[in-house]
């Protein structure tokens, strides 16, 4: 039995390792605490120890045992903090700049995917928008996928269990997160923040292709876009957000 | 009933005053939260300065004076109540209520001026023009001054009830409590006035 | 004559200003709400194990109803079970008797507080019966879902006011008013109405903790009250405080909510810890270990509690560097609480432990909370929280903290103080059966859910067969085990109900001080008379004088002079 689902990203293993590291500390703390809790229940039961000792615990010589335990706890806390901080920075703070940009927009109740198109920017007119129900996002393997996360109506949460990443999407905000997939496959993108009646059915897929397959797939998409060639000003999927953004921009002037 | 005559009294601060301080602390945190949220938004949206122009500093200033005066009269009422001059205490309390009423009247004149300009709680005209951010200033303006006005009304009601009670010779110590509450109402306004009227 | 009798019933049991009656009223309403909360849990747990099947006693559960039920289960269990039972119920029962006075400082305010609380419960339940049903967007009520995004409330003011969302906000606001009134009473009573000689360091731990909890509550709920006002206006007049397209910010609500919501955890935890602090010394026949230090630790945690709220928002769009700050804060706050629990464990060492029913619940609380507390380390470290956030790991974690806290804390208090305040002896065998069934089924309900969470099971989904990572074995079996255990857990509370009614109808009269405890409530009659004490006691010593060397008995009540 695997504790975690299949890992498919470069940083996924770090999260798993972090779990086992914390588990080690927690297990030690748990065993010690259980001994400290259950041993006296046995040793100092009414039968074995009919007369209790008078210990107030206000003396330093008594309290030092609690202090040792607290210092141990504080130390393991900070070891955990130290160990995990690098992972946090890597996933949340140091978003790479090179890679493929995609837009993931939460709507009630699906994910809408945007490819950046030719200009390399998401949420522009030349985006290729995939918004038919349950059409997946194809991404290449071993490439930084920079995800711009948005929400159109309510708060959602992009959760990629196999990528070990998750982030809320909030109306009016754009969060830029990333992933680098190391395995070909089809992975779920679910919504982890309650978003209304059909929150339970909100799910889409990210398909990780080999580079050749991905290029083929994109070429087909571009061909389709060219043949349609309808000068759509902005894809319908980005309407509201685009308007909100432009409103803000106009207000700033 | 038990024999309560031996009830031990170790209180240092009178009970009512202690409760009132606690209540005021709670109220100030509610307003504090609101003011903090307003300030964060104000920093985020510099264009709110242009909206604040529509609030009338003159009316605000008059209202500040009215409230300060009414705070002064409630202090006098407390003073007279301490000396057991019930009639004079009642007079000063009545003046405080008049001050509160004057405040509310001026406030309603202000509100009606602003509403006639289309600046309402939701300012639908602004939202329709795509100036939602500006309409948010007015939402804050109304929620802050409105919540404060509710406190003015609550304070006036309290003072009125206590005024009636001391007329019957009861609860004279409560004049002080009403005064504390009224000072809190005044204090909140002292914060709202510069935030909504002066800073443009 | 008959009319007069009726009135006296109402004034004695319904509109009483006696703190004991009000305390029992609070606990009764809390338990009734727990029945509703438990029923909701039963319905959605059943649906999770057997999706789409007809639920006995209910029928089909629609997705929207599922959302409504989980939302209200959370709301009810935290605000209408935990708060009234632990804070208001125990506070009202215990504070005046433990500090040695006749009643609360403001008895009328106290009664008013109870009735406003009851009104708030009615408003919350009423939301189930309005068109559109109760709110179903999670108990955290994140806008825009709670600001019209859920049911697209009509712009008509009255309809919007009587929508499930608005009623829930109103119910919470009313409850806060009630709790604030109660909090003022607790503080003023403790500060002003203590018996002679009851110096601060002679006040029993639970009174300290109830007061600290009241202070935390008062100082953290203000911003949320303001936020609730804004959210209500968003709903009924259509302002845009939380509407991003009009410059509002949905994250603002999350800050306001969790600025209150996290201290709220300690508001619930501290009274239950106070219960432990009373029970463990009595049944170890030993003074509470490091009584003063525990209080200092609790004060420290009260201060820290207002700087940890954003650990609920590690992945919700706050600045990642901020998250590190809150992660450190969260980990630091674990230290005072660990200290308090260690002090309780240290109290056991060298004692003479009696395994009575309250003691079993108290020790069970410590043991279970250990799991809840330690799993908190996973979630407090922000990098792992990226993965575990909003998963069943979190669900299992907070049930391992809040269930022992609310229910074990309450049951410990119940079995401990019931003989005093209702004057009847509870059945010990039934009590022990109740303890073991509750402990076993609680663990089998929630422990396996940790694994479901780690395997990527996210929260608030009515049918997991839709999702590849968790539809597989053994995780779907775990769901079924959890559901069957949860049903057993609910059913085993019938033992408690049986014990309660059996005792009330035919229980033996309890002695004045059945546990040989030293605090003041055991000094007076059983049950305490109206006014509590015939003559007010004078206090000469601390609350935990057990097994004092060279003393006649193994305990010295607080009111005994040398």
Image (cartoon, rainbow, N blue to C red):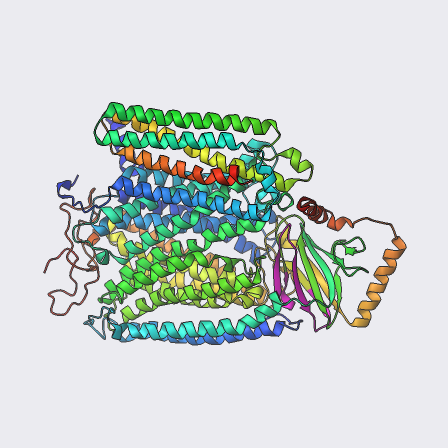
Residue B105 versus residue B30: which sits nearer the camera? Answer: B105
Residue B38 versus residue C214: which sits nearer the camera? Answer: B38
Give the vertical position of C485 relative to C26 (above or below).
below
Q: Does the stretch in magenta take in A171? A: yes
Q: Is residue C431 left or right of residue A29?
A: left
Give the vertical position of C499 relative to A210 (above or below).
above
Spot occupied by residue C439 in the image (x, y as percentages of width and height): 40, 63
Q: Is residue A173 left or right of residue C223?
A: right
Q: Is residue C166 left or right of residue B186?
A: right
Please provide the residue range marked out in magenta. A159-187
Spot occupied by residue B38 in the image (x, y as percentages of width and height): 52, 44
Position of the N terminus of chain C by quadrant? top left
The residue shown at (45%, 48%) is C76
Q: Does the stretch in magenta take in B64? A: no
Q: Is residue C244 left or right of residue A139?
A: left
The residue shown at (15%, 47%) is C536
**Residue B164 in sight in this render:** no
Q: Can you tell which quarter of the image residue C534 is in?
A: top left
Residue C345 versus residue B131: which sits nearer the camera? Answer: B131
Spot occupied by residue B183 in the image (x, y as percentages of width and height): 36, 37
Position of the C terminus of chain C by quadrant? bottom left
Spot occupied by residue C302 in the image (x, y as percentages of width and height): 38, 57
Residue C320 versus residue C428: which sits nearer the camera? Answer: C320
């Amino acid at each position: 039995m695997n504790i975690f689902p299949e890992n498919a990203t470069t940083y996924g293993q770090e999260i798993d390792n972090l779990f086992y590291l914390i588990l080690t500390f927690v297990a030690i703390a748990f065993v010690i605490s259980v001994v400290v809790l259950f041993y006296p229940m046995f040793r100092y039961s009414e039968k074995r120890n009919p007369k209790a000792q008078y210990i107030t615990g206000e003396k330093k010589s008594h309290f030092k045992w609690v202090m040792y335990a607290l210092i141990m706890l504080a130390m393991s806390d900070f070891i955990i903090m130290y160990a995990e901080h690098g992972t946090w920075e890597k996933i949340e703070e140091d978003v790479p700049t090179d890679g493929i940009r995609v837009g993931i927009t939460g709507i009630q109740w699906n994910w809408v995917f945007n490819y950046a198109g030719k200009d390399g920017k998401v949420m522009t007119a030349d985006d290729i928008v995939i918004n038919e129900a349950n059409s997946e996002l194809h991404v290449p393997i071993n490439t930084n996928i920079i995800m711009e996360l948005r929400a159109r109506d309510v708060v959602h949460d992009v959760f990629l269990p196999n990528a070990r990443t998750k982030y809320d999407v909030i109306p009016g905000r754009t969060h830029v997160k990333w992933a680098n997939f190391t395995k070909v496959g089809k992975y779920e993108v679910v919504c982890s923040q309650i978003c209304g009646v059909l929150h339970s059915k909100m799910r889409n897929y990210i398909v990780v292709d080999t580079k050749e397959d991905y290029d083929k797939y994109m070429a087909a998409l571009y061909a389709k876009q060219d043949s349609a060639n309808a000068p759509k000003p902005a894809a319908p999927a980005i309407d509201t957000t685009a308007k909100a953004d432009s409103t803000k921009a106009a207000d700033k002037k | 009933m038990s024999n309560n005559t031996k009830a031990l009294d170790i209180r240092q601060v009178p009970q009512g005053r202690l409760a009132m301080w606690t209540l005021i602390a709670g109220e100030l945190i509610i307003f504090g939260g609101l003011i903090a949220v307003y300030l964060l938004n104000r920093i985020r949206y510099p264009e709110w300065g242009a909206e604040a122009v529509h609030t009338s500093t003159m009316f605000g200033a008059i209202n500040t004076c009215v409230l300060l005066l009414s705070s002064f009269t409630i202090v006098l009422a407390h003073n007279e109540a301490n000396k057991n001059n019930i009639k004079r205490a009642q007079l000063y309390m009545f003046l405080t209520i008049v001050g509160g009423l004057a405040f509310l009247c001026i406030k309603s004149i202000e509100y009606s001026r602003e509403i006639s300009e289309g600046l309402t709680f939701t300012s639908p005209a602004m939202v329709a023009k795509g100036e939602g951010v500006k309409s948010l200033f007015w939402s804050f303006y109304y929620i802050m001054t409105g919540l404060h006005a509710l406190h003015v009304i609550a304070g006036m009601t309290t003072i009125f009830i206590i005024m009636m009670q001391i007329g019957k010779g009861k609860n004279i110590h409560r004049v002080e409590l009403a005064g504390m509450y009224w000072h809190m109402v005044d204090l909140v306004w002292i914060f709202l006035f510069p935030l909504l009227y002066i800073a443009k | 004559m008959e009319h007069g009798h009726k009135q006296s019933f109402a004034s004695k049991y319904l509109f009483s200003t006696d703190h004991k009656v009000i305390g029992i009223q609070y606990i009764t309403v809390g338990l009734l709400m727990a029945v509703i909360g438990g029923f909701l849990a039963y319905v959605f747990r059943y649906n999770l194990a057997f999706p789409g099947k007809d639920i006995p006693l209910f029928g089909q559960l629609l997705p929207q109803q599922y959302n409504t039920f989980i939302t209200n289960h959370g709301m009810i269990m935290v605000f209408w079970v935990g708060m009234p039972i632990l804070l208001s119920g125990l506070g009202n029962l215990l504070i005046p008797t433990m500090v040695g006075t006749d009643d609360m400082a403001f008895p009328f305010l106290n009664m008013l507080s109870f009735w406003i609380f009851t009104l708030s419960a009615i408003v919350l339940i009423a939301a189930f019966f309005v068109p559109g049903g109760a709110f179903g967007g999670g108990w955290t009520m994140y806008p825009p879902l709670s600001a019209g995004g859920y049911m697209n409330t009509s712009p008509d003011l009255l309809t919007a006011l009587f929508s499930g969302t608005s009623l829930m906000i109103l119910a919470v606001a009313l409850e806060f008013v009630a709790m604030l009134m109660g909090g003022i009473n607790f503080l003023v009573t403790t500060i002003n109405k203590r018996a002679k000689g009851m110096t601060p360091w002679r006040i029993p731990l639970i009174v300290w903790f109830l007061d600290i909890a009241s202070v935390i509550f008062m100082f953290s709920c203000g911003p949320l009250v303001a936020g609730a006002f804004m959210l209500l206006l968003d709903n009924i007049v259509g302002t845009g405080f939380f509407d991003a397209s009009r410059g509002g910010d949905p994250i603002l609500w999350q800050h306001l909510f969790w600025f209150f919501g996290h201290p709220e955890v300690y508001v619930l935890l501290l009274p239950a810890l106070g219960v432990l602090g009373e029970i463990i010394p009595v049944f170890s026949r030993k003074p509470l270990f490091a009584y003063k230090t525990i209080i200092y630790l609790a004060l420290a945690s009260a201060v820290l509690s207002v700087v940890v709220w954003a650990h609920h928002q590690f992945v919700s769009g706050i600045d990642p560097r901020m998250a590190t700050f809150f992660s450190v804060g969260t980990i630091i706050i674990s230290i005072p609480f660990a200290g308090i629990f260690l002090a309780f464990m240290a109290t056991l060492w060298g004692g003479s432990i009696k395994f009575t029913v309250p003691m079993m619940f108290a020790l069970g609380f410590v043991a279970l909370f250990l799991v809840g507390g330690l799993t908190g380390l996973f979630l407090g470290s922000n990098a792992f929280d990226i993965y575990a956030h909003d998963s069943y790991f979190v669900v299992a974690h907070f049930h391992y903290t809040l269930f022992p806290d609310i229910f074990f804390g309450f049951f410990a208090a119940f079995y401990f103080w019931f003989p005093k305040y209702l004057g009847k002896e509870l059945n010990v065998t039934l009590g022990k059966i109740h303890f073991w069934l509750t402990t076993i089924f609680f663990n089998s309900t929630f422990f396996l859910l940790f694994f479901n969470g780690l395997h990527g099971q996210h929260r608030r989904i009515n049918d997991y067969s839709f999702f590849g990572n968790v539809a597989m074995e053994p995780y779907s079996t775990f769901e079924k085990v959890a559901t069957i255990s949860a049903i057993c857990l609910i059913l085993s509370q019938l033992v408690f109900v049986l014990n309660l009614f059996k005792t009330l109808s035919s229980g033996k009269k309890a002695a004045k001080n059945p546990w040989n405890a030293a605090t003041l409530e055991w000094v007076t009659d059983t049950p305490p008379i109206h006014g509590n004490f015939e003559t007010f006691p004078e206090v000469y010593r601390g609350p935990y004088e057990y097994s004092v060397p060279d003393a006649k008995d193994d305990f010295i009540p607080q009111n005994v002079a040398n």
